Image: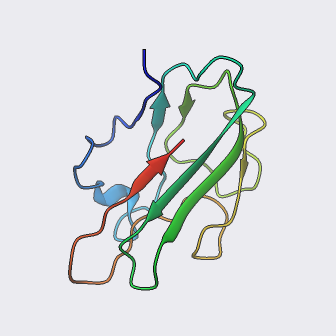
């Protein structure tokens, strides 16, 4: 099976629900993935928006995700260290804060958000 990442909160290519944006509660969406490639020791996640007016905008960075992990629960706390999955660490986003910073594009053209694991 191919390594794949998805969210039960929205379909690929669909709008991210308001709950996960600055217009809502700004909580991180639940993410799920399949078994990573053999010999993977840890994973890193980057969520970005290449359509931001200032260039690529990073909304979320998580690293040291254990290779055994298969989910990031909805509503990850905005702390450096995560309890679930244990050992994962969040970096600062381009809003200058730790953790998830949901979509908050200016009015105008639609933006795309890439979830890369």
Residue 43, given in percent of the width and then of the height, sits at: 66, 37
Q: Quadrant of the C terminus?
A: top right
Residue 95 position by quadrant: bottom right
Q: Quadrant of the N terminus?
A: top left
Left/right placement of residue 70 relative to residue 102 reads right
Q: Which residue is drawn at 40% across and 70% down?
A: 22
Residue 66, given in percent of the width and then of the height, sits at: 72, 29
- Residue sitting nearer the eye, 39 or 25: 39
Q: Residue at x 55, y 59 (%)?
A: 100
Examine the rendered structure and indicate whether residue 26 appears above or below residue 83.
below
Left/right placement of residue 11 relative to residue 64 reads left
- Residue sitting nearer the eye, 52 or 77: 52
Left/right placement of residue 15 relative to residue 72 reads left
* Number of numbered tags placed on the structure image: 0
Residue 59, given in percent of the width and then of the height, sits at: 52, 64
Q: Which residue is drawn at 54% across and 19% down?
A: 35
Residue 20 position by quadrant: bottom left
Q: Which residue is drawn at 44% across and 46% down?
A: 29
Residue 38, given in percent of the width and then of the height, sits at: 65, 17
């Amino acid at each position: 099976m191919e390594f794949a990442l998805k969210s039960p909160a929205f379909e690929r290519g669909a709008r991210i629900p308001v709950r996960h944006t600055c217009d809502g509660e700004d909580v991180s969406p639940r993410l799920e993935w399949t078994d990573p490639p053999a010999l993977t020791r840890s994973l890193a996640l980057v969520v970005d928006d290449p359509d931001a007016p200032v260039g690529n905008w990073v909304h979320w960075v998580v690293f040291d995700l254990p290779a055994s992990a298969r989910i990031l629960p909805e509503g990850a706390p905005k702390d450096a260290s995560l309890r679930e999955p244990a050992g994962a660490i969040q970096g600062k986003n381009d809003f200058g804060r730790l953790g998830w910073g949901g979509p908050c594009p200016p009015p105008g053209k639609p933006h795309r958000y890439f979830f890369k694991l």
